[in-house]
DNA sequence: CGACTGTATGCACAAGTGTCCACCAATCCA
DNA sequence: TGGATTGGTGGACACTTGTGCATACAGTCG
């Protein structure tokens, strides 16, 4: 296998030196393979930040020292993993968006498109949901950054949709944020649920989201309204 | 080893076994002191589940082996810590509730009462917010259980309040859940914010919560309404 | 060919971990 | 007084961890 496979998009924009190794020994293991190995280890019980250098190396089938050729740290690997998960996440959402415009219930369609890969075996997604807010500062900001990407895309969606239907929409940014956090919290919760109970959770989540959207329409942004 | 401490219901007001040691050597260090020590170590960067037996013992000033006299495991300690944090949390909320009924804005008063101890140095609270969903299955269910307690109390609050003001309130359970998750997500986020930015986050959170409450009033529980 | 270079490995080390064991210390009850 | 019981200690064990150093491997270039 060649490293030459560009695969440029981990962060969306990093140039990432596509011509790294023109001379010297061919890499027997790629950076991506290491990420995969780490993913395989980091089950539900183990925080991403508890990953061990030797452990990852073992899983990937290389010597512990070789790890340093690809990452300087396990933290660095964790951050890369989060960013990759975030990309995967937003890709899912974009697909959901495409599907949603032609369906009856935008909320339901989008949410189901979001939940489905979680019910499947998308380790990346599970990882992202779980990682939340523990770990090194870099890791935390990495997660937060991805969440904000998510919120931003959702906000412009909400804006477009409201305009399309001639709805009022007050504070779309906050509506997007509330929606995001609810969805993530519920998706995380669904990870510990039996598949049979997930459908119910989806229904409940839809109700919550509709509350937010209804509220965003009814909201008056003036201050000091009655409690 | 026996836990010996019956701890019949984590729910409320645990009697806390006042007569544990009637015979034998006087304990030089209490179970609580160990919890405190663990709390002191578990900073923002370290997940609760990465605590080390020896580490906690060192911080508490006892021999590693003595740890076993109080907890069978670091996991057990972590769960105890979470439950303690949950209690502290609900105590705060009850106080907020008392204050809130005599104030103008229930939402703002409650939320500020919630955020204030976080801005202070309540390590317990920070811990709880952060721990979210990583760690052993026992730890995760412990966190989830505390969240549900929280939701239940909030739900009955919402119900009472709606009745008092003659408001409609559809699906109060889900309104409570949405509220809870938003508050927790935002509180967690505020942990990484400079104090000067927290006020803004509180304001934004209030808007989000009002959206939910407004939506819960406007909501029609019938199925299949227009998207 | 040999020189050069990036990749991967083996070995070793100090440090840290959980846990077992025997032992001491204090306190109560008979 | 003397068990009985509980709390705490110290030493040792087998193990894992991150990392430094020297060295072998596999290419590419002149």
Image (cartoon, coloured by chain):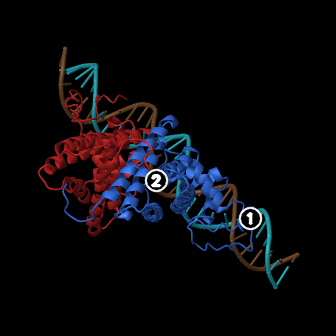
Chain colours: A blue, B red, C brown, D cyan
Residues packed near mark 2 inside 10 Å, few (<14), some (14 to 19) or many (20 plus): many
Q: Kindly identify which numbered label has been placed on residue A2.
A: 1
Is residue B42 at all visible to an observer of this figure?
Answer: no
Is residue B86 at all visible to an observer of this figure?
Answer: yes
Q: Position of residue B100 (x, y in %)?
A: 16, 51
Q: Residue, x 71% and y 64% (percent of image)?
A: A27
| First in residue order: circle 1 vs circle 2 | 1
Q: Residue, x 49% and y 39% (percent of image)?
A: A199
Q: Which residue is mark 2?
A: A131
Q: Position of residue B137 (x, y in %)?
A: 45, 39
Q: Position of residue A28 (x, y in %)?
A: 72, 60
Give the CA separation, mark 1 to mark 2. 31 Å
Q: Residue, x 41% and y 49% (percent of image)?
A: A185
- Badge 2 element: helix
Q: Residue, x 52% and y 48% (percent of image)?
A: A112
- Badge 1 element: loop
Judging from the image, mark 1 belongs to the subunit labelled A
For the image, the number of numbered tags is 2
Q: Kindly identify which numbered label has been placed on residue A139.
A: none
Judging from the image, mark 2 belongs to the subunit labelled A
The answer as to whether the residues below labels 1 and 2 share one chain is yes
**Left or right of residue B80, residue C10 in this image:** right
**Residue B176 occupies quadrant:** top left
Q: Position of residue D1 (x, y in %)?
A: 19, 21
Residues packed near mark 1 inside 10 Å, few (<14), some (14 to 19) or many (20 plus): few
Q: Nearer the viewer, residue B56 or A173?
A: A173
**Left or right of residue A22, residue B33 in this image:** left
**Left or right of residue A63, residue D10 in this image:** left
């Amino acid at each position: 296998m060649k490293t030459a496979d560009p695969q440029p998009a981990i962060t969306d924009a990093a140039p990432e030196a596509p011509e790294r190794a023109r001379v010297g020994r061919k890499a027997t293991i790629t950076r991506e393979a290491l990420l995969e190995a780490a993913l395989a280890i980091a089950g539900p019980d183990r925080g991403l930040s508890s990953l061990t250098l030797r452990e990852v190396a073992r899983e990937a089938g290389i010597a512990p020292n070789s790890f340093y050729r690809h990452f300087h740290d396990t933290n660095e690997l964790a951050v890369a993993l989060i960013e990759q998960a975030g990309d995967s996440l937003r890709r899912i959402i974009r697909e959901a968006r495409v599907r949603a415009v032609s369906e009856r219930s935008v909320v339901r369609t989008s949410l189901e498109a979001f939940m489905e890969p979680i019910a499947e075996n998308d380790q990346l997604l599970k990882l992202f949901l779980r990682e939340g807010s523990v770990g090194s500062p870099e890791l935390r900001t990495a997660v937060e950054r991805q969440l904000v990407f998510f919120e931003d895309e959702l906000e412009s969606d909400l804006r477009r949709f409201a305009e399309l239907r001639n709805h009022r929409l007050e504070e779309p940014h906050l509506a997007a944020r509330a929606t995001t956090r609810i969805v993530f919290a519920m998706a995380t919760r669904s990870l510990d649920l039996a598949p049979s109970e997930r459908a119910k959770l989806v229904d409940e989540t839809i109700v919550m989201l509709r509350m937010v959207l209804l509220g965003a329409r009814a909201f008056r942004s003036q201050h000091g309204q009655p409690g």
